[in-house]
Image (cartoon, rainbow, N blue to C red):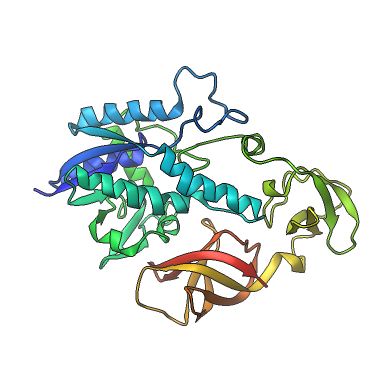
Amino acid sequence: MKTVVIGMSGGVDSSVAAILLKEQGYNVIGLFMRNWDSTINNDYLGNPNLNNNICPQEQDYNDALEVCKKIDIPLYRVDFVKEYWDFVFTYFLDELKKGRTPNPDVMCNKYIKFDLFVKEAKKLGADFVATGHYARLINGNLAKALDKNKDQSYFLAYVNKDVFKNVLFPLGEITKPEVRKIASKYNLITAGKKDSTGICFIGERNFTQFLENYLPNIPGDIVNIDTGEILGKHIGLMYYTIGQRRGLNIGGTKDRTFVVKKDLDKNILYVAIGDDNKYLYSTCALIEEFNYLTDYKPSKCTCKFRYRQPDIDVEVDYLDNNMLNLKYKGSKAVTPGQFCVLYDGDVCLGGGIIKEVR
């Protein structure tokens, strides 16, 4: 009997994934990761859980423990608080300092869930590791899940491809409503539990206040990029992303106003007025540090520049040093620092970081 170590998060997805693995005849072992400590990490401002009797991570552990007892599998626990800070949160802060828009969930998968977790799982005798991600493996290649509304392949595109040789995604062929139904059938405590949101392993925070724990506020001018008129004051460039229109606190315009540029040297946030202003759109993007998941390098394929964005058609020029140049019909708010993920149909070809757009 093959042994599978599954990441138990205390949520409904990993709970049902563990059940499905047991039904398939595997010897299943649960492993819970603790990756954030609010006290050690000075997480006070913007933290809505400070007055709770139990922190959310401990509640998640207790939920995972109850599920594991109910389905009769052991649960172990591992602490990656330091590693998460070093490999994920430090990257997150560094990108914000550069005026870019980071994606900590992608880096968490690369360095924590599909690296350190895998190494820990092997210590427990794992032949395979599994998670509750909505994704599939087709002929060993990462691919979109059957449930396209929940597909998480975008967040997995930066994982080392060799890791997938020993990974199982039990939820890849079923939908979220089916997952909830299975959890209810087994009367699991997680059956109706709300899905986790916010920053990976940190959770919901008042983002502005949360960042004040780690980065200084440097207010500056908000300027109309067309006219040069000062429209208001920003509270710090790190709080804004390209394409953002909410939270600017400026008035006096009939049409909607969007963030279109950050000038770090002058500490200016540039905005443009109107949904169709030219500054929001680009037709070319330079991608760096691309992580190839297949040997196939098509000149035409599709890509996502954001998780919830529909796939768009792109032409690809493959450059040296794992860089790509993408050409496409005008796409809105393509943002440096975010991840670009390429697809051939449902198969994920890999992903890289958006360096610049034009």
The residue lying at 84 percent from left, 50 percent from top is 221
| Quarter the C terminus occupies | bottom right
Residue 11: x and y in percent read 37, 36
Determine which quarter of the picture holds residue 189.
top left
The residue lying at 29 percent from left, 52 percent from top is 169
Whether 21 is drawn above or below 50: the answer is below
Task: Tell me: 190 left or right of 70.
Answer: right
Residue 115: x and y in percent read 33, 52
Whether 205 is drawn above or below 155: the answer is above
Q: Is residue 175 visible?
A: no
Determine which quarter of the picture holds residue 59.
top left
The residue lying at 59 percent from left, 66 percent from top is 355
Task: Tell me: 197 left or right of 234.
Answer: left
Whether 206 is drawn above or below 113: the answer is above
Frontmost residue, 205 versus 121? 121
Task: Kindly give the residue lying farthest to the left in the view shown.
Answer: 1
Residue 165: x and y in percent read 24, 61
Frontmost residue, 132 versus 126? 126
The residue lying at 29 percent from left, 63 percent from top is 162
Q: Is residue 245 visible?
A: yes
Frontmost residue, 246 versus 180? 246
Whether 193 is drawn above or below 125: the answer is above
